[in-house]
Image (spheres, helix red, strand yellow):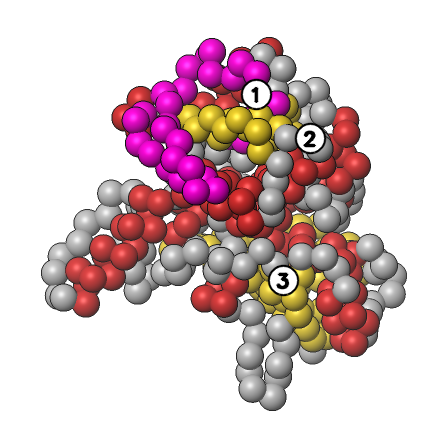
Amino acid sequence: MAKNIAIVGATGAVGLEFLSVLEKRDFPVGDLKLLASPRSAGKELTFRGKKYKVEALTKDSFQEIDIALFSAGSSISKEYAQHAINAGAVVVDNSSAFRMDKDVPLVVPEINPEAAKNHNGIIANPNCSTIIMLMAVYPIHQKYPVSRIIVSTYQAASGAGMAAMQELEEGTRAILDGKPFTPKVLPHVAAFNVFSHNSAIDETGYNQEERKMVYETWKILEDDTIKISATCVRVPVLRAHSESIHLGFRDKTPSEEEARELLSSFPGVQVVDDREHSHFPMPIEASGQFDCFVGRIRKDIAEPEKEMELFVAGDQLLKGAALNAVQIAELLL
């Protein structure tokens, strides 16, 4: 049965990917409503060969909508999600607004699809870094429970939105041309540079992105005994995040062959682990792909009987955002 869909933040980087993913996955869309800020109202976007005009978001935008896909930031979600619910829609929210609400399920469909059934009108999409990490960890964790995760992320400009992607391109051109460049979106020049993730740091010294990876993982896996430490970093990549993951195990540790088999048989994962040609997951190859690529599968040389290393790359705008949200919407069909 076709569902009437509203996309909030339709002209943003994730909003545009919503349209692409809905089309590629042949989602049964009935009526489609594209919503954004007043400055974007009147723009036209194409879906399945038909042009749709973007409307300004208001509290009355959700009449006769079945599913509302939100990706316009937490403040917009907090202001408008309840209006969508009151109108009868189920909200799939891509912001951080409701992720840690005990009454809101936090869902990665390959991992905890059953959680989506227990919604009260809102289902939250996890943070992109958390999703991509768990797509590499969970296939192994199912059979060999992990007790420790140490992760370092290499996060693309896409995580900060379309304006940050444009700023990376403009900064790269300026530096190559020997011209001065002052960033306006990111706190530091992204081109030819690496810096700590641009989110608030608390008294522990961890930033918000790092804390999200801890608390969201606990919620999704329903296990807050897993020890998790994250270091999140921006790198000069347009889209697709990469992550270096160190795993410790509760009891038994899988062999490299077992880990490869578990990963290769898991939906949404491709193993890219060619040691002979030094070909492992790369963001340039993961960009535009629905699957997450996992490789560098090896025992920790210091603790080979207890610990293992992985490397993953996944498209932040797709599995880290729009694709995961559409997969959640598919659970509602």
Which of disc 2 and disc 3 is earlier in sequence? 2
Q: Which mark is residue 29?
A: none
Residue at image location 33% in from the left, 34% down from the top: 44
Residue at image location 62% in from the left, 73% down from the top: 272
> Which of the pair 262/68 is nearer the observer?
68
Look at label 2 and name its amino acid.
Met
Q: Is label 2 in a helix, a strand or a loop?
A: loop
Q: Are marks 1 and 3 in contact (CB under 8 Å)?
A: no
Residue 261 magenta-highlighted = no
Q: Is residue 97 left or right of residue 1?
A: left
Residue lying furthest bottom: 276
Task: Give x and y (percent) for residue 247.
Answer: 71, 62
Residue at image location 55% in from the left, 49% down from the top: 24
**Residue located beneath label 2 in the image:** 1
Indicate which label's residue lies in the foreground, 3 or 2.
2
Q: Is label 3 in a helix, a strand or a loop?
A: strand
Judge the density around disc 1: few (<14), some (14-19), many (≥20) Cα neighbours within 10 Å: many
Task: Give x and y (percent) for residue 41.
Answer: 31, 25
Judge the density around disc 3: few (<14), some (14-19), many (≥20) Cα neighbours within 10 Å: many
Judge the density around disc 2: few (<14), some (14-19), many (≥20) Cα neighbours within 10 Å: few
Residue 59 magenta-highlighted = yes
Residue 59 in sight here? yes
Cα separation between marks 3 and 2: 41 Å
Q: Which mark is residue 65?
A: 1
Q: Which mark is residue 245?
A: 3
Q: Is residue 125 left or right of residue 255?
A: left
Give the magenta part as a residue range.
41-70
Residue at image location 30% in from the left, 55% down from the top: 168
